[in-house]
Image (tube, rainbow, N blue to C red):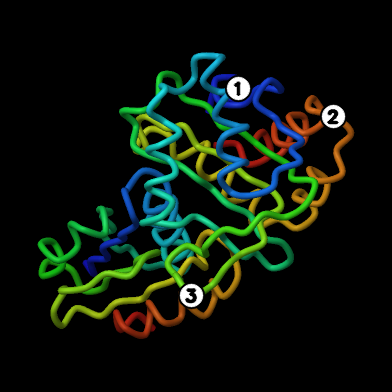
Amino acid sequence: MKRILVACGTAIATSTVVAKKIEEVLGNKGYQVYVDQCKAAEAPSKAANFDLIVTTTPVSGIGDVPVIQTVSFLSGVGMDQDIQKIMDILGLE
Amino acid sequence: MNFDAFFSKDLVFFLNASSQEDVFKQMFHRMYEQGYVKESYLNALSEREKVYPTGIQTEHIGVAIPHTDSIHVNKESIGVAVLEKPVSFIHMGMEEHTVEAEIIFMLAIQKPERQLGVLQVITGLIQNKVLLQSIQMAENEAAVIAIIQEYSQKLNV
């Protein structure tokens, strides 16, 4: 199963919602993914175990793992494009 | 989700605020007086906002969802403020962009993993132009709560 790490500033509100949304949208398309969430500061130490990082705030020091920085899952603006990006990166077609 | 545990007309604000700081102060004062947040909440909120800004540009208006660590929260609640005139927030994740925020959802959250429902309600509202407009045009505090409650029931989270 593909693994997505969702990061935000303090893991209080935004990453919770974003993680759920991604799971839901991909689930509706028939893809099961493992989604975990963390604070942006924790991303570097967790990144290696994931196929993709989706973050609402800039992250650094995460090596070769692809990163999508976006707030589309909160604002609704550009969400479809971001889902497509996620699917492309994870090779879900 | 237990709607009444989070939303109350006592925590709806129609604000004439001059700045982000002013919004924070006015909302904090009532939330503090009513025991929802600790004295430390205001400062913690401002500091967090500087590092991790919460302005969000939606399709048609700017909003903001300021929040801070749960240690500053006594009782979970959501403050909703409709601003008479927009106030600038830095956009989440984009330091170089500002958002003219017109509606503020101030989150006093303790256990995020258990609050998915209320967070989904807020995200859903943010993405819904019609609902945000009706909140802006609401006649009073109770009307704002009624709009959010109806949506929350529809969402059934």
Residue nearest the viewer, comparing A2 with B106:
B106
Q: How many marks?
A: 3
Q: Residue at x 43, y 40 (%)?
A: B45
- Rendered image quadrant of residue A4: bottom left
Q: Residues within 10 Å of mark 2 (few under 14, many from 20)?
A: some
The amino acid type found where label 3 is placed reads Glu
Q: Which mark is residue B140?
A: 2
**Looking at the image, residue B10 lies above or below residue A34:** above
Secondary structure beneath dot 2 equals loop
Q: Are marks 1 and 3 on the same chain?
A: yes
Subunit that carries the residue with mark 2 = B
Q: Between label 1 and label 2, give the one nearer the viewer.
A: 1
Q: Between label 2 and label 3, give the one nearer the viewer.
A: 3
Q: Residue at x 63, y 54 (%)?
A: B63
The amino acid type found where label 2 is placed reads Asn
**Looking at the image, residue B150 lies above or below residue B142:** below
**Looking at the image, residue B116 lies above or below residue A86:** above
Judging by the rendered image, the residue that carries numbered circle 1 is B30
Q: Which mark is residue B96?
A: 3
| Mark-to-mark CA distance, 1 and 3 | 32 Å
- Circles 1 and 3 in contact, beta carbons < 8 Å: no
Secondary structure beneath dot 3 equals strand
- Rendered image quadrant of residue A36: bottom left
Q: Residue at x 15, y 67 (%)?
A: A47
Subunit that carries the residue with mark 1 = B
The amino acid type found where label 1 is placed reads Arg
Q: Residues within 10 Å of mark 3 (few under 14, many from 20)?
A: few
